[in-house]
Image: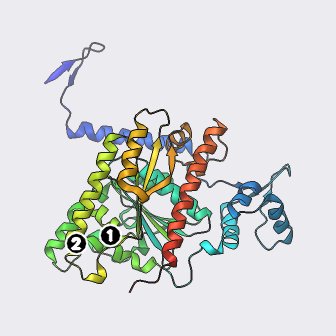
Amino acid sequence: MAEVTAETGNQVSSEIDMQRIQALAARAEGMVSQVRDRLLAPESRKLPPTFTTTQLASLCGVDKAHVNYRVGKGDLPVGKLTPTGARREFDLAEIRQWARAYRPAQMRPAGRRSICIAVANFKGGVSKTTTAMVLAQGLSMRGHRVLAIDVDPQGSLTTLHGVLPETDVTEEMTIAPICHGSSNDIRSAIRSTYWDGIDLVAAAPFLFGAEFVLPSRQLRDGSTRFWTVLSDALESVRDLYDVIIIDTPPSLSYVTINALWAADGIIVPTQLSGLDFASSAQFWGLLADLGVNLDEQADLVHRKRFEFLHVLLARVDSMDAAAPAIRQWIQATYGEHVLPIEIPRTTVTTNKSAEFATVYDVQKYDGSAKAYRRAVEAYDRLVELVEQSVVAAWRKPVRT
């Protein structure tokens, strides 16, 4: 079948074969690369922000005068004065050192292991990846060492770190060798990132193959526990990091199951919409059914337990007339599991996500200062609440 274009009179096939799809894929990949290079110019890579004395003081819970006093003592990083001498700036590594000095009660106690958090939802577009990235950034700013693991083949968390899944990621940088069984240790996949305090296990489209590999391994070897492959691989790094954050695909896939069974806590971002509410109900129903089934195959000690479950209301539009009713549904359903903070839908969050960034990457926001503060305050509170759950888990007696 062919059609004639009015402009040229040439015949163009109306059928779309794989060659045309390949051409579209190549064009899309090239455009993404161009966009990244333009947004991250001149170095084509992400750079961490710097921080003012005011920001450092707020993070440490002291006033600016106290920071200036400690700078005078010289026992903590002193930062650098701007060329005009008008203010002092600190880099990310410096504020992390200050945070560890001023927040010892929130640091991982000796002898305790990292807390692993899975950010999950069966529905896409609910700020799942942004939530994972902001948590990693916020916790690292507070002095914690974070491992971010991207197990979504789309690689959105990888992209937020300034790494393009299609061109920058090789198989050994992902969980693919673990899924295939060629490795049982995640350390070889870990890479440093532009953000001090965050290491990354990346993802790329070839991870879709894990959905076939994991069940086939189970069929070949009945002793394989496909749902603990990732958890087992994390054993070697549980003492090296304070928090491990896993960003999952928007489905109950074999990879998602691995992420959930590796996790000590789950965060489920959801929007105030009827469809999202229904989707989250499916999430908990399927998770419960799966958990009961897998627990039947484990002894009492190894049955799955979570330290915390949090439902996060994200991308909340204050002008949405339906929001109050849906908020009541969610509160009535999930009760104490609903976090007492809502992430607002603002131009700040939408604009920064379009620039391979989050609000914590912003050095200077050109839009509404009020909107920026509202977004940052909401994310700061989210990080604070999650950190409280992490610290509470550390303080519990060790389960035997």
Going by the numbered disc 1, the residue's amino acid type is Trp
Label 1 close to label 2 by CB (< 8 Å): yes
Q: Residues within 10 Å of mark 2 (few under 14, many from 20)?
A: some
In the image, what residue occupies the spot 25% across and 36% down? 20
Instruction: Please provide percent x and percent y for residue 196.
Output: 60, 64
Q: Is residue 196 above or below residue 16?
A: below
- Asked if residue 47 shows in the view, the reply is yes
Q: Work out whether residue 72 or residue 26 is closer to the camera in this orientation and state it.
A: 72
In the image, what residue occupies the spot 29% across and 77% down? 303
Q: Residues within 10 Å of mark 1 (few under 14, many from 20)?
A: many
Badge number at residue 261: 1
Going by the numbered disc 2, the residue's amino acid type is Leu
N-terminal of the pair, mark 1 or mark 2, is 1
Instruction: Please provide percent x and percent y for residue 159.
Output: 46, 52
Badge number at residue 397: none
In the image, what residue occupies the spot 31% across and 61% down? 256
Q: Work out whether residue 96 or residue 265 is closer to the camera in this orientation and state it.
A: 265
Q: Is residue 327 above or below residue 258?
A: above
Q: Would you name the residue on which mark 2 appears?
A: 294
